[in-house]
Amino acid sequence: MRRPNILVFMADQMSALALREYGNATTLAPNLSRLAARGVLFRNAYTNYPICAPSRYTMLTGRLPHLIDAFDNAAELPASVPTVMHYLRRLGYRTTLSGKMHFVGPDQLHGYQERLTTDIYPADFAWVPDWRAGPRNAPTGINMRAVVEAGWCERSMQIDYDEEVAFHARQKLWDLARQAKDQPFFLTVSLTHPHTPFTASKAHWDRYDHARIDLPRVGPIPVEQLDVHSRWLYYSHGRDRMEVTEAHTRNARHAYYAMCSYIDDKLGETMEVLERSGLLDDTIVVFTADHGDMMGERGMWFKQTFFENSTRVPLIMAGPGLGRGREVEANVSLVDLLPTLLSVADDGRVELSTPVEGADLTRLAAGDGRGWNGRVHSEYYDMGVCAPCRMVREGDHKYIYTHGHPALLFDLASDPAECRNLAGDPALADVERRLHAAVLDGWQPEAMTERILHSQAARQLIWGVSRADAARDNWSIEARNGDKRRWVRGGGDQEGTNAVKGRMRFPYVPPTPQADPKPIPDVPGLAR
């Protein structure tokens, strides 16, 4: 029997809670709806790390972040760690990447046999965080300008990049359709929308009635009432330096929805090529994202937190051997994709040479949830925080651990907006004790702290002596001449990602001034 082709279509920073299939009636994404109707939708899918690179490493390796030292967006994925691409090549697949994967280090393939485009972000150690600098450490320059300057544009760096990625992916499908059909393919199409900044094309912006853009369910929470992790991000994102009004929030959400529609259009164009080329009936299509976006909920933006908007991701699978129009309620996560893709590639067999933490989702997709433990983990150690942070969800309960600080416990069935912290409630003492043990199972926060600080120091040393060397190879793939100048790179450019992207916006919008940073209150763990 011929093995099925596999196409993984990825969005960047797309929250499941922004989509109609997950309860949001605003977003216009008909192609996603059609894909869900012909496949299986996982209603409670989570990222294992709410920021780009570690989440993608986990998805491709089947390993949880701390087990492969995926500490942050400047962490190198070791070339010695097998990926799903290596396993699929063992089964005879041709493996191709078009778009972003945020690999850091000299290995820019990790089992892909070819890359059709470069990456949009640096492959060097430019973005190493520094916990010793306190919560304001943000090597990418992420800040509230992305919200305050939200709106439409004719062109942006994101659009430039994704147009190129989508074009090359469609052309690759036509090339594959012309070739002999005896070798299956694994093609990853990875776009950067709806990642910040919140700028959408005029055409996609105009699909929405601005007056009908919904506002967050939970408004801004006073900084003194925030949990410690959220307070860290408050200062890291510079929310004390720039006022975000209701008008700014509506503009940013409008742009975010419009960017989701852009992704939907690109998915539709890709599906059309699959259908017209005769490849659709032999191809498993997986749609997902690396993490979500807070979209102004609780006054928070971007990712880096364990609240639902940031950690819940869309996950839809459709194709031969999978159900149609089915929804799965069980908790799953991106770490489950490696064994799942191997299962669909090899008629239910998953032969592994190394340990993985993920589990095969095909039985769940078929409606058989027997034996599924429904427990998912997520971790965070990157810019903005100052200690190891971890989350576990089991059933309807979510437990958030910030080392050295009070925990959070939510019942998502009765409190989907996560407004009532139940930690310390005697009625849930057994639940809290069990989830606390689950967070610490195989994960020691004191040891993690030492490993992370050592890793940061080592990479900061290397970056410090190499950043000024204009002749050095910064490891980024150069798919065509000029790639290393067109996109966000390391080198001496430390003005921040938002600033680089801002220069590429057309028409140009001058940067909004920010107030000088205010002293951070003397709260243990906030000022170091």
Image (cartoon, rainbow, N blue to C red):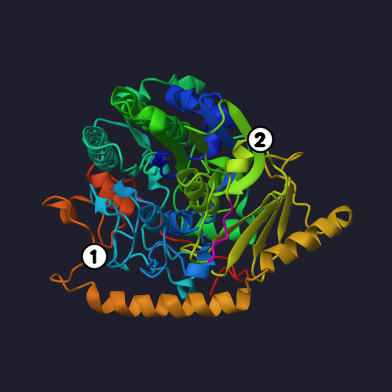
Q: Quadrant of residue 263?
A: top left
Residue found 58% across the figure and 79% down from its top: 447
Mark 2 Cα-neighbour bin, 10 Å: few <14, some 14–19, many ≥20: few
Which residue type does callout 1 highlight?
A: Trp
Decide if residue 49 is in sight here.
yes
Q: Is residue 351 magenta?
A: no
Q: Is residue 361 left or right of residue 270?
A: right
Which residue type does callout 2 highlight?
A: Gly
Secondary structure of the residue carrying numbered label 1: loop
Q: Quadrant of residue 362?
A: top right
Give the x, y percent position of residue 235. 50, 59
> Given contact means CB atoms under 8 Å apart, are the residues at marks 1 and 2 in contact?
no
Give the x, y percent position of residue 42. 58, 38
Decide if residue 258 is in sight here.
no
Give the x, y percent position of residue 366. 62, 35
Lower position in the chain sequence, tag 1 or tag 2: 2
Q: Is residue 220 left or right of residue 505?
A: right
Q: Nearer the viewer, mark 1 or mark 2?
A: 2
Q: CA distance from mark 1 to mark 2?
A: 44 Å
Question: Which residues are drawn in magenta?
Answer: 355-359
Q: Residue furthest right?
A: 427
Disc ID at residue 475:
1
Q: Residue furthest left?
A: 481
Q: Is residue 94 left or right of residue 252?
A: left
User: Residue tagged by mark 2?
Assistant: 367
